[in-house]
Amino acid sequence: TTKELEKILINLKLLKKGKNIVDFGCGFGSAIQYLSSKHPNIRFFGCDKNKKILEIAKTYTDNKNLRYLYQDFLNFKKNKLLENISCVFNIHTLCCFKNPQKFIKSTTHMKPEFIIIKSLFYDGPINTFIHTEDLGEANKKNIDGDLNIFSKQMIIDFYKKLNYKYISYKPFFIKKKLTRDKKSGRKSYTIKFNNRLNTFTGPVYLPWGFMI
């Protein structure tokens, strides 16, 4: 995912000196750590609403061009550091929301030049709401999860209302085979058909893609 994102950023000429890029919903920061290590002339910001996760993320790297900031997706607060933003990207967060409009609006608050979303999309006029419960992790707190698949055109229309023009869409297919772990229902695995490795979790097909 991160290397595919890097290719997109290069094509958009966003990995040039002086650019400011935000990972909105960075989690433990794996993507932003990789990018900040490879592109030291770019300023990167990792934002998340989970303060504990951010503290852990800070221990993984001391890259001088990377800063972690607390931000609540649905209650965005202005921060002078998050001005003149070139790009906001997000990986695997939109699909967790039942109301995508709230999250979409939150990605525009920093007024970035570009917004890149990797999530689950369907090329048709239908939304699919999927709630999973991993019984193999019943002793953990995070056994629940949402994998909501949204109409691609609906998301495009939402952004259009916020004055963001649709540029392109690229389906994402994992290149390395992932085997199914029968002990973990939620862990992703792949099945090959149509000469591609298609991703699943449990019984659910995951149509991942990048929207710009």
Image (cartoon, helix red, strand yellow):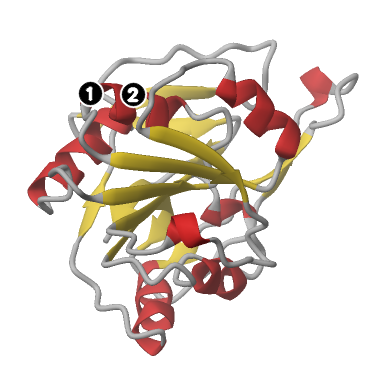
- Mark 2 lies on a secondary structure that is helix
State the CA–CA distance, disc 2 to disc 1: 6 Å
Please state which of residues 110 and 179 is positioned toward the viewer in this rendering: 110
Residue 197 visible to the viewer: no
Instruction: Quadrant for the N terminus, please.
Output: top left
| Vertical order, 96 against 57 (above or below) | below
Residue that numbered label 1 is attached to: 38
Question: Neighbour class for label 2 at 10 Å: few (<14), some, many (≥20)?
Answer: some
Question: Neighbour class for label 1 at 10 Å: few (<14), some, many (≥20)?
Answer: few
Question: What type is the residue that disc 1 sits on?
Answer: Lys
Please state which of residues 1 and 196 is positioned toward the viewer in this rendering: 1
- Across and down, in percent, residue 30 comes to 45, 25
Question: What type is the residue that disc 2 sits on?
Answer: Tyr
Q: Are marks 2 and 1 in contact (CB under 8 Å)?
A: yes
| Vertical order, 167 against 68 (above or below) | below
Q: Residue furthest right?
A: 139
Please state which of residues 53 and 144 is positioned toward the viewer in this rendering: 53
- Across and down, in percent, residue 150 comes to 49, 64
Q: Identify the residue at image location x=43%, y=81%.
A: 158
Q: Residue furthest bottom?
A: 161
Give the left or right position of residue 102, taking residue 115 as reference.
right
Residue 49 visible to the viewer: yes
Residue that numbered label 2 is attached to: 34
Q: Identify the residue at image location x=41%, y=58%.
A: 121
Give the left or right position of residue 108, taking residue 39 as reference.
right
- Mark 1 lies on a secondary structure that is helix
